[in-house]
Image (spheres, rainbow, N blue to C red):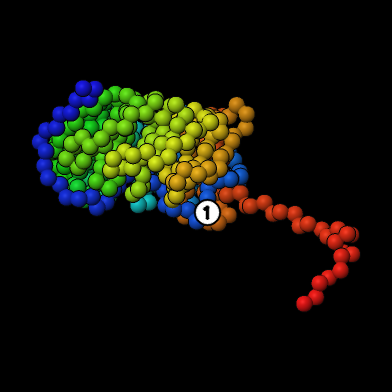
Amino acid sequence: MRRAICCACLCLVPALSLVECPAPYRLAAAQPAPLLPAEVAWSRTLENAPASTAVADDARIYIPLINGQIVALSRASGDLIWTADVATRWPLVLLDESLLAVSDASLVELDRASGAVRRRQELPASPAGPLTRAGEVLLIPLQPALLIAWHTKDSREMWRQTFEAPITVPPAVNTGWGLVIVSSSDRVSGLALADGARRWTTQLAGTLMQPIITRDRVIVGSTSDDVYALDARGRWQWTWHGGADVVGVTADAEQVYVASLDHMVHALKPGKADQQWRKVVKTRLKFAPLLVGSTLLIGGIDPALTAFSTRGGDAGKYELPELAFLAAAPLVLDGAEPDGVTMVLFTGHREVLGLRRQPPKEEPQKKPSDADSTKPSVLD
């Protein structure tokens, strides 16, 4: 058989009650209006390219740069607010009034308002992947193949677990199940959230992407061109075979959305992988799809953004100037004012663009012709 499945230490777990995703990858809240079409509200050129996508709060946007700095820009205007000399290649995590970053072999806490370093905590090794926050638990992947759980309130290590390969994508956390779902090379594992004990491991094919949880399924895409579904005990439920490497998956309660390198986006039923619709995207896909309310946002080369409704209808696109391309995944901003910035793009030319929704074009009013004015009126 093409896949090999090895499950160990299976345990009964309760039904799904809550899915928590890492902050940079969290499914954004439903928007009051479509994101596209959009127009530029402000732009700013950075001194260096972004090292990863950004995070944002109500006032500022926080961007790690490849030169070993973090910058904070005004969400409203794009103006530079502060610069901090902290080197990281992973997205930051918001925590109360702080920012958390992994830099070298340490966990760094920054003040959001000023960028000042509040605290540094030494880690057992250098980071291998992005941070994932689940309430007061911070999951930190470390070299060579270690995952530690850090209690943010008590500033202490809770547990650690080793794997067969580095963890380079964010785990998924489900508090109802009490599990952390981890992709590592060709294996996906379920760990107890409380103590890190490994409940099960399932071996699949290819290199696995970031796992997601929807309803009672763990969904994970692979470079084997496949999407796999497991239950809460790690048991195989179905395999959907696509036409190319899977770029990423996302889901809502009704459908699983799959983007792949053959320029295709598919919508599947999570229970049986029945295909609901598919769309051709006229771009080379670069980033996992982002679900924003009832809009599926796809980031690529040209156009930079393509949007579909969750029913498969076209919902708009956004094109960058010629030769420009996205250097990091787009950032969708929650809670934007009706005329405020709703999305931030990061181009390969070190430019940051704050986009707002484009107001609908007003149709010109038709002027009555002379012939119309001479027509007799009809009276009741």
Q: Secondary structure at mark 1?
A: loop
Q: Position of residue 170 (x, y in %)?
A: 31, 36
Q: How many marks?
A: 1
Residue 373: image quadrant is bottom right
Residue 366 versus residue 23 in the image, above or below = below
The amino acid on which the numbered mark 1 sits, given as a three-letter code, is Ala
Q: Position of residue 327 (x, y in %)?
A: 49, 31
Left or right: residue 33 versus residue 54 is right
Residue at the (33%, 29%) spot, across then down: 241
Residue extending furthest toward the bottom: 380
Task: Locate the C terminus and report the quarter of the image it occupies.
Answer: bottom right
Residue 218 versus residue 163 in the image, above or below = below
Q: Label 1, on which residue?
A: 33
Residue at the (19%, 31%) spot, across then down: 202
Task: Locate the N terminus and report the quarter of the image it occupies.
Answer: top left
In the image, 230 versus 119, the foreground residue is: 230
